[in-house]
Amino acid sequence: ERNASKISSCADEKNYAAASRTYAEFYDPIHDFFDKVLVNDKNLEIRANRQALMKKINELYTEKIADLSLITNQ
């Protein structure tokens, strides 16, 4: 949330390099999250919270920069 307006502003200005640098600030925490946290937890409230967080991050990029669902490990 702290970086959302900054990323959005950079994208609006077509300053994708700056948007990418801002994204890089939370690259490691996102990857740590997926390595250490089960998003689809058995507890429905926890699951919904974690899915909402992932949706928010995805929307930030799909609306302004790139569709993250297209990224694959090949």
Image (cartoon, rainbow, N blue to C red):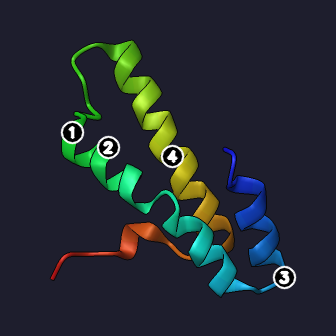
Which amino acid type is shown beneath numbered disc 2? Answer: Phe
Q: Residue furthest left?
A: 74
Cα separation, mark 2 vs mark 1, equals 5 Å
Left or right, 10 with respect to 73, comes to: right
Does label 3 or label 4 sit earlier along the sequence? 3
> Mark 1 and mark 2 in contact (Cβ < 8 Å)?
yes
Which amino acid type is shown beneath numbered disc 4? Answer: Lys
Indicate the quadrant where residue 51 lies. top left
Does label 1 or label 4 sit earlier along the sequence? 1
User: What residue sits right under mark 1 in the picture?
Assistant: 36
Left or right, 70 with respect to 59, comes to: left
Give residue 66's position: percent from left, percent from top. Answer: 55, 76
Cα separation, mark 2 vs mark 3, equals 30 Å
* Residue 17 vertical placement versus 23 (above, below): below
Q: Residue 54 or 22: which is nearer the viewer?
A: 22
Q: Residue at coordinates 44% horizontally, 68% vertically from top-left?
A: 68
Q: How many C-alpha atoms fall within 10 Å of the one at disc 2: few (<14), some, or many (≥20)?
A: few
As drawn, the label of residue 13 is 3
Does label 3 or label 1 sit earlier along the sequence? 3
User: What residue sits right under mark 2 in the picture?
Assistant: 33
Cα separation, mark 1 vs mark 4, equals 18 Å
Cα separation, mark 2 vs mark 4, equals 14 Å
As drawn, the label of residue 55 is 4
Q: What kind of element bears circle 3?
A: loop
